Image (spheres, grey):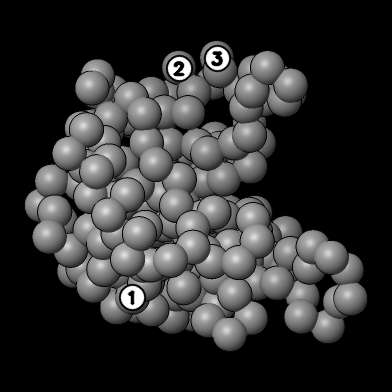
Amino acid sequence: MNYRILGKDLKVSAVGLGCMGMSHAYGSPADKNEMCKLIAKAVDLGYNFFDTAEVYGTANNPHDNEELVGRALKPYRDKVIIATKFGIEFDKTSNATNSPLIPNSRPEVIRKSVEGSLKRLDTDHIDLYYQHRFDPNVPIEEVAGVMADLIKEGKITHWGMSEATDENIRKANSVCPLTAIQNRYSMMARHYESLFPVLEELNIGF
């Protein structure tokens, strides 16, 4: 396995494992014992970067994926990087097949989210904590300030943003340096390539 440095010093495997589909969005949740075995195999192959979010779950267990990831990675906690996300809720009043997202990054909500994620992941810190979506009702500088406080408190060690824009990246980074941006990118979704120069300038991983 090859490894990369995100931001200043976060060393991650060049191939990571997104765990969302084990619990969320692609049919019924997979068997947890089988998923724990799969995650263990990934660690054995050299993966050290695992991604989840507080909202990856089911109607019966809204936080299913964090609980699964925490359980599966507990034996390897000192060897792995865990990324999770805060800042959105699903609109449960909607009848749409895919429930609309409601952004919510108020400082008190972030505080509640990080404590919940730490408990479910069964860890004393989160290695990479992403804002899942920008909240137009909360200045990004205010969110970055909360991240700086969480880093000082040792609850997270790095932070990032998902589906971020150039303007918000610059504003957030000026308050608390970002480690990574998680935006959609593939041969069929290349609209974020315009961010590459600013990410190189600011030394932020993509």
Q: Are marks 1 and 3 in contact (CB under 8 Å)?
A: no
Q: Residue at the location (23% across, 50% down)?
A: 40
| SS at mark 2 in the image | helix
What is the quadrant of the N terminus in the image?
top left
Q: Are marks 2 and 3 in contact (CB under 8 Å)?
A: yes
**Rendering quarter of residue 204:** top left
Q: Disc 2 residue type?
A: Glu
Q: Is residue 162 left or right of residue 33?
A: right
Q: Are marks 2 and 1 in contact (CB under 8 Å)?
A: no
Query: On screen, 153 above or below 18?
Result: below
Residue annotated with mark 2? 200
- Crowding near the residue tagged with mark 2, few <14, some 14–19, many ≥20 C-alpha atoms within 10 Å: few
Query: On screen, 26 above or below 119?
Result: above
Residue annotated with mark 3? 197
Percent coordinates x, y for residue 167 in the rendering: 65, 36
Q: Disc 3 residue type?
A: Pro
Q: Residue at the location (37% across, 36% down)?
A: 16
Looking at the picture, tell me which residue is in the foreground, 59 or 160: 59
Q: Disc 1 residue type?
A: Arg
| SS at mark 1 in the image | helix
| SS at mark 3 in the image | helix
Q: Give the number of the disc on residue 171.
A: none
Q: How many marks?
A: 3
Can residue 163 be seen here? The reply is: yes
Residue annotated with mark 1? 120
Q: What is the C-alpha distance between the residues marked 1 and 3? A: 37 Å
- Crowding near the residue tagged with mark 3, few <14, some 14–19, many ≥20 C-alpha atoms within 10 Å: few
Can residue 151 be seen here? The reply is: no
Mark with earlier residue (2, 1): 1
Q: Residue at the location (84% across, 65% down)?
A: 97
